Image (cartoon, rainbow, N blue to C red):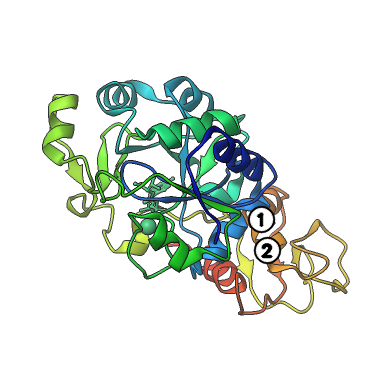
Amino acid sequence: MPVEAVTTASIDRAAAALRAGRLVAFPTETVYGLGADASNARAVAEVFAAKGRPRFNPLIVHVPDLAAAALLAELGENGRRLAASFWPGALTLVLPRRADSGIAELTSAGLSSLAVRVPAHPVAGALLRAAGRPIAAPSANRSGHVSPTTAAHVAADLGERVALILDGGPTRLGLESTVVDVSGPTPVILRLGAITRADLVAALGRPLAFVGEVPSRPASPGMLARHYAPATPLRLEAREVLSGEALLAFGEPEPPHTGPALNLSRSGDLSEAAANLFACLRSLDGAGARGIAVMPIPQQGLGEAINDRLQRAARPE
Ligand code: TXA
Ligand code: MG
């Protein structure tokens, strides 16, 4: 069982595992997180595989302090005000991502925004400092299960998938962080959590809308985050490349083509394909082709999430 008591040595081992691209579960004041190096697309793909998520939801990036957050994203005035009131703490800010953030596209599911949080838990803080890089972490449960508030919950759900679980005891809040999108002119609450709407209103000095109350933003769970959609039309399950099309290949052999082409994984590895997906789409979208022919991806394991995103990208909402 990979559960380890918190010591300087176990934190150092956990930080080394994260830097090596492995997964580590760690306590925060809200719930336990399933951490991966946010700059390592392969490690982030393993998070989705371990959770058994049929979709790529964008993940929260955890950093030790405000200065580290400012290297990744533009805080803006609303962001600074909320960060000053609640960080470290149970508030996640959705912010415009900086071009030089170094965060993998898969971490934010291809979006131009980034969700960032500075957790208020001494073990999380020590781990983030020891790792020395931003850590992407969803709640450390399998998809469809409730968020874990003890190391034993994590071990029961994900024990075989993680390098180690740091046991920081039961989490203090037991409820996920509140997510506020401050990337636009009007702050919008995307998820209510440990910090209440009244707390936010007091800090901002103005009312805040919840996502369901904004007519232009539907509240169905899958829509809480906007999806990345390329402007170039996608043609899925393509077995040949038509004239003027770019090719997004998977495995080998590739169909004959003359235009721009990228391969999600030559060896047909779904985890490698997931890691490359958003960066490849973005790059082919900018290639000036009239369409993108996407080869079939097997509907198994991470292939399900890849196909979900491709289908959404093929018919933009
Ligand atoms: O308390 C918490 O927030 C825990 C601990 C581990 O930090 N984490 C957590 O992560 O609950 P997760 O993946 O279960 O939930 C992340 C939420 C989702 O609702 C997701 O849609 C939203 O944050 N989110 C992440 N990035 C986003 C983005 N760029 N735009 C909009 N929403 C985003
Ligand atoms: Mg969750």
Instruction: Say which residue appears at 44% left-offset and 50% top-offset.
Output: 33
Task: In the rendered view, tell whether residue 70 sits above or below residue 236.
Answer: above
Q: How many marks?
A: 2
Task: In the rendered view, tell whether residue 9 sits above or below residue 292.
Answer: above
Q: Position of residue 216 (x, y in %)?
A: 27, 52
Q: CA distance from mark 1 to mark 2?
A: 6 Å
Q: Amino acid at mark 2?
A: Ser
**Quadrant assignment, res 241:** bottom right
Instruction: Say which residue appears at 70% left-offset and 49% top-offset.
Output: 283
Mark 1: give few (<14), some (14-19) or many (20+) Cα within 10 Å: many
180 sits left or right of 290 in the view: left
Which residue, given by chain and number where applicable, does mark 1 sit on? 275
* Viewer-proximal residue among 209 and 14: 14
Task: In the rendered view, tell whether residue 164 sits above or below residue 186.
Answer: below
41 sits left or right of 213 in the view: right
* Viewer-proximal residue among 220 and 316: 220
- Badges 1 and 2: C-beta atoms under 8 Å apart? yes
Is the shortest distance between ligand 1 and the CB of mark 2 under 8 Å? no
> In which quadrant will I find the N terminus?
bottom right
> In which quadrant will I find the C terminus?
bottom left
Which residue, given by chain and number where applicable, does mark 2 sit on? 271
Q: What element does badge 1 sit on?
A: helix
